[in-house]
């Protein structure tokens, strides 16, 4: 009995130690994600007759054809009017890079973006639909994991979110390009960009649910770098570009190629997941490059496309696969 109790205690403290070492924490006090069968206590579905998965990450909306790039985490406490009052917490140590207190300017409503450097990767956490951004929050200020940064709300640029499904929309992203504002102005002359480089189009989302669950594995220590490197390939492209910002920001995703190291780099082979996250960057020498196009589709994982088609980054025309307008636009942004 004593040995069994000691073993259980040892396992408990081992799990707690792993959790303490985890790079990300829950952004609210709602931790029901870990309780099997309690998904509807954690996620806010899009409607009462919709499954909890409609509040999770992925191709979960419009019959699998619309992407949702975050988690809609349900409120746990309200005021007398039924509005949420849950504190919103920084998911990891980081820096405040942006916030907006003008809800009419984005479907995010009031939102905050923090930058985190974890295992050499820049990750950007986003917290949306807030009722309040903390009054003394300042751009460039450091924050600690678990520190309060705002209050959950129902704000957006539309009609607002129903009280019963009030939630925090939470994202974990990689940044596409620090030159987004200039790229957007060039590609969309005359269109407004109220948030400069902190526009949601400049982020490619990772699945926070997968990250939070894997962090809790008591057997294997979680590595964010391994998680990103281990994404499932949807498609592979060749780009004739050698000096775009993503290469510098995500050096840990660059693979080794002795041929390119010897002959010089003429371009890159990019491997992307279904949400367009480039998770492997292989330098290529001129002798290894195919064709003369600036961007060329090399291959498509058809099984993954059938499972997750919602971003519409590639499409099949007859027996051939090709990059769609959305796919070409994303690569243009990435290499701008």
Image (spheres, grey):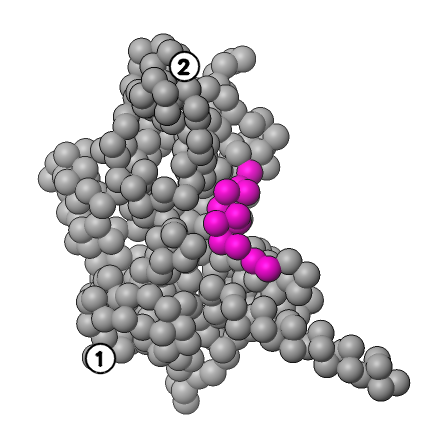
**Quarter where residue 279 is shown:** top left
* Residue nearer the viewer, 144 or 309: 144
Q: Residue at x 72, y 81 (%)?
A: 9
Q: State the separation of the CA atoms marked 2 and 1.
A: 54 Å
Seen from this angle, which residue lies furthest left? 190
| Residue 190 shown in magenta | no
Residue at the spot x=35%, y=53% of the render?
122
Q: In this view, does 306 lie to the left or right of 285?
A: right
Q: Quadrant of the C terminus?
A: top left
The residue at the point 61 percent across, 30 percent down is 303
Q: In this view, does 87 lie to the left or right of 184?
A: right
Say the numbered circle drawn on residue 92.
Answer: none
- Does residue 201 appear left or right of residue 232 in this picture? left
Disc 1 secondary structure class? loop
Q: Residue furthest bottom?
A: 80
Per the image, the residue denoted by label 2 is: 288
Q: Quadrant of residue 81?
A: bottom left
Q: Residues within 10 Å of mark 2 (few under 14, many from 20)?
A: few
Residue wearing tag 1? 135
Q: State the image coordinates of residue 151 (x, y, percent, origin top left).
A: 35, 77
Is residue 164 something that shows in the picture?
A: no
User: Is residue 95 at all visible to an observer of this figure?
Assistant: yes
- Quarter of the figure with the N terminus: bottom right
- Which badge, 2 or 1, comes first in the chain's sequence? 1
The residues colored magenta run: 221-232
Q: Is residue 55 left or right of residue 278?
A: right
The structure residue drawn at horizontal position 30% and vertical position 50%, both measured from the top left corner, is 200
Above-or-below relation of 278 to 88 = above
Q: Determine the image quadrant of residue 103.
A: bottom left
Decide which of 217, 110 is in the foreground and name it: 217
Is 223 a magenta residue? yes
């Amino acid at each position: 009995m004593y040995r069994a109790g000691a073993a259980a205690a040892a396992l408990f403290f081992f799990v707690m130690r792993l959790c303490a070492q985890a790079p990300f924490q829950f952004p609210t006090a709602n931790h029901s994600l870990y309780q099997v069968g309690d998904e509807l206590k954690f996620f806010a579905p899009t409607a009462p007759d919709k499954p909890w998965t409609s509040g999770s990450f992925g191709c979960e909306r419009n019959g699998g054809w619309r992407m949702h790039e975050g988690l809609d985490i349900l409120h746990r406490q309200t005021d007398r009017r039924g509005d949420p009052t849950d504190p919103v917490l920084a998911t990891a140590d980081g820096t405040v890079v942006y916030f907006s207190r003008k809800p009419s300017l984005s479907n995010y409503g009031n939102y905050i973006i923090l930058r985190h450097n974890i295992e050499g990767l820049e990750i950007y956490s986003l917290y949306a639909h807030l009722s309040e951004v903390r009054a003394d929050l300042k751009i460039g200020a450091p924050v600690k994991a678990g520190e309060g940064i705002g209050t959950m709300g129902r704000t957006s640029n539309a009609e607002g979110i129903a009280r019963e499904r009030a939630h925090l929309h939470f994202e974990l992203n990689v940044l596409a390009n620090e030159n987004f504002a200039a790229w957007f102005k060039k590609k969309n002359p005359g269109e407004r960009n109220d948030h400069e480089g902190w526009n949601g189009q400049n982020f490619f989302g990772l699945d926070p649910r997968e990250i939070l669950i894997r962090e809790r594995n008591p057997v294997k220590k979680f590595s964010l770098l391994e998680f990103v490197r281990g994404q499932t390939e949807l498609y592979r492209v060749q780009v004739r570009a050698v000096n775009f910002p993503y290469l510098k920001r995500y050096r840990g995703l660059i693979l080794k190629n002795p041929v390119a190291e010897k002959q010089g780099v003429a371009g890159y082979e990019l491997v992307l997941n279904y949400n367009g996250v480039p998770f492997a960057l292989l330098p290529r020498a001129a002798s290894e490059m195919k064709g003369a196009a600036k961007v060329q589709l090399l291959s498509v994982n058809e099984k993954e496309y059938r499972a997750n088609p919602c971003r519409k980054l590639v499409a099949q025309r007859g027996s051939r696969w090709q990059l769609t307008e959305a796919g070409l636009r994303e690569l243009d942004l990435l290499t701008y």
